Image (cartoon, rainbow, N blue to C red):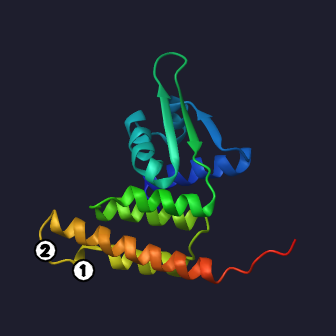
Amino acid sequence: MANLSDQIEKFIKQLFKEVDENVLEIQRNELAGYFNCAPSQINYVLATRFSVERGYYVESRRGGGGFIRIAKIAVDEDTLVKKILEGIGDSISQSCAQDFIERLSENKVISNSEAVLLKAAVDKSNFNIEVPYRDIIRARLFKNMLSALFHYKSSNRVPQKD
C-alpha cells in the first residue's frame, strides 16, 4: 500500500490529467480534509513532490480564501535537457538528481530503463567519499551521462520531411 504522501501526489497528478491544463488550483484545507491529514502534510507533498526540479511551480495564498496554485512548467525536450544540465551545477545531491530524473521520465524524455540506470548511477552507495566531494563527483557523472545520452538520441533522430 502506498504511503499518504504517495497517495496525495498521485491524486494531484490525476487532477492535472482530468483538467487537461498546465495550472491547477486547489484548497489546502479541502485536500487535507479529503485525505484526513494535517494541512502540513499537504505542504510537505507540495514541497517535495512538486518542486521546480520536478517541473512545477507552486504558489500558495493563506487565509480565508486561500488556495494553492500548481503550474506545470512546460518546455520542449531540448530546452528541458539544457535547463537540467544548467541546474545540476558543480554539485548535486542524490535527491535533487533523482528529482531531475523523475522530471525527464514523467515528460517521456527518457525511458523507464534509462531512468533506472541514471538513478542507480547517482546513488550515494557508489561514492565512498565525504560530502562535498561526493556531490561534486555525482554532478560531473550525471552531466556526462545526460550529455552522452542526449547526444546519442539527437544524432539518431530521423529528420522530418517537409
What x and y, as percent, mark residue 34?
55, 39
Q: Amino acid at mark 1?
A: Asn
Residue closer to the observer: 4 or 114 = 114
Element under label 1? Answer: helix
Please tell me which residue is depicted at 28% across the width and 61% down the height of the picture: 90
Please tell me which residue is depicted at 23% across the width and 77% down the height of the picture: 125
Please tell me which residue is depicted at 23% across the width and 65% down the height of the picture: 135
Q: How many marks?
A: 2
Residue closer to the observer: 7 or 12 = 12
**Viewed as shown, does residue 76 lie left or right of 146?**
right
**Viewed as shown, does residue 160 lie left or right of 135?**
right
Gap in Å between the C-alphas at discs 1 and 2? 9 Å
Which residue, given by chain and number where applicable, does mark 1 sit on? Answer: 126
Which residue, given by chain and number where applicable, does mark 2 sit on? Answer: 129
Residue closer to the observer: 142 or 68 = 142
Please tell me which residue is depicted at 42% across the width and 34% down the height of the picture: 39
